[in-house]
Amino acid sequence: MAESFASIGLPKWLVEALSAMKINTPTNIQKGTIPKILEGYDCIGGAKTGSGKTIAFGAPMLAKWSEDPCGIFGVVLTPTRELAMQIADQFAALGSTINLKVALVIGGESIIEQSNQIKECPHFIIATPGRLAHIISEHPEDVRALKRVKFVVLDEADRLLTDTFSEDLSVCLESLPASNKRQTLLFTATVTDAVRSLKDRPVPEGKLPVLLHELDKIDDVTVPAKLFLGYILTPFLVKESVLHNLLVNDDFKDSTAIVFVNRSETAEILRRVLRHLEIRVTSLHSEMPQSERTNSLHRFRAGAARVLVATDLASRGLDIPSVELVINFDIPRDPDDFIHRVGRTARAGRKGESISLITPNDLNRIVAIEARINRKMEEYSNISDSSLIKKSLKTTTSAKIEAKMEMDREGFGERKRYLKKRANAGVYDLETGLTTYKVTPTTNKPSKKSNKKSKKVTN
């Protein structure tokens, strides 16, 4: 008999809430971690995207909160705004019948309003480190209740433990209870050495040892068995034409697809090119205002757009169902990013297809990726007719020129150039929008014209 959520220790009200969300049977990561979290263990959970990690840490936190529902009970930190919004939505859905209060603390929204929300002591805070660190630094009187939280979660822990987030993460953790006075949960799709090493740290007095539950060891990572891994060799100058032919050919003309690129500018150009070519498309990248990012995800999830052009913002954690095709327009620098990208399709045992557009400059990256996943890609030859590529090249080139002209008129990239200029004078925080200026003390040196020693003056 299959295990149920009740059999692994969740209370009746939470089992019913999960059932209302059509979640009736715990996944492996949930079975392996929920009982131990309920027993009080700190936990490191590693499992691939789509395995139910949010429920694995969210459900036991809510179960423990329901026993003592007062003050700020837990803080969840996650690297991107979209992931934070998704987690907040799941917490709200789980607690919809019990008046659960969840505060979403992310960049792109009113910092005063978010500071006031924290001051009112919601039950859970879902935040990006940059925005929460800024509130802690600028409004310390509003965050005193953080010292009493019972749970701290690092979602996508491998990313949060990199240098990119280290300063903000330190500010956040210093404002939370000491590790021996809270439960700490780390969840990630990739358990890196940095994450795994936390298990071996000395256990504070009165604490249980850290539980490491890792379903897919980093050295054994595989892409889904039902995922076709294809490639198309293409000259750099005709990539847009190849992409267009791929999206409109008989194999994929009705498929939902994510097109991954390495830069925000490329994502914006492709969105405009494909729109000119009458493909229902939207995009997701860091140069977009938060309202547009949210709207783009909503359009893609709702089927209003069948193609999402995205940077790696969309490669991890986001719940984007029924993606049938992943196209790597640009090959990622890190093989693990490739794994996360193609993991957007062929989920839950379904079939899926991934096709990478490979230029001669990408060959070294492809060798590294194939070694990492222990699989060879297969050539996709259904659009190998060069006459079709040449026929559409004029159209795609014209659309690309028009797209770039539009972006120039609208000042795309001005924000990034302005921020770079500001960063040269200080430290710019993309999440908070603030620059900390570096002030170098000046030293009064004796004039070169005089060899006299300066007199020491005592006040």
Image: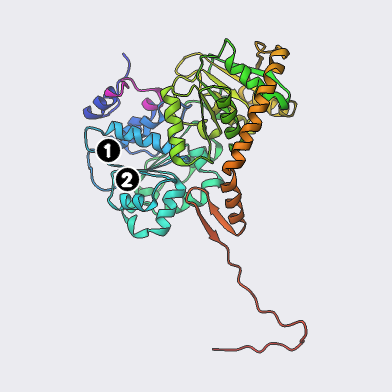
Residue at the image point whose x is 33% and y is 16% from the top = 2
x and y percentages locating residue 284 in the rendered image = 51, 33
Q: Name the spot of residue 4 as percent of width and height, x first.
A: 30, 21
Q: Position of residue 38 (x, y in %)?
A: 31, 35
Query: Residue type at mark 1?
Result: Lys
Q: Which residue is mark 2?
A: 150
Amino acid found under the numbered disc labelled 2: Lys
The secondary element bearing badge 1 is classed as helix
Image: magenta residue range: 20-31
Quarter of the figure with residue 137 = bottom left
Q: Which is nearer the eye, 358 or 195?
A: 358
Residue 375 higher or lower than 106, as above or below:
above
Queried whether the magenta region covers residue 447, the answer comes back as no
Query: Is residue 22 magenta-colored?
Result: yes
Report helix, strand or loop for mark 2.
Answer: loop
2 and 1 marks in contact (CB < 8 Å): yes
Q: Is residue 164 above or below residue 300?
A: below
The spot of residue 127 in percent (x, y) is: 40, 44
Placement of the N terminus among the 4 image quadrants = top left
Q: State the residue position of label 1.
A: 64
Which image quadrant is residue 125 in? top left
Judging depth in this view, the residue of 142 and 218 nearest the camera is 142
- The answer to whether residue 268 is above or below residue 183 is above
Task: Please identify the quadrant where the C terminus is shown.
Answer: bottom right
> Gap between marks 2 and 1, in whole Å?
9 Å
**In this image, 190 relative to 186: left or right?**
right
Q: Nearer the viewer, residue 396 or 36?
A: 396
Residue 148 in view in this figure: no
Q: Is residue 140 visible?
A: yes
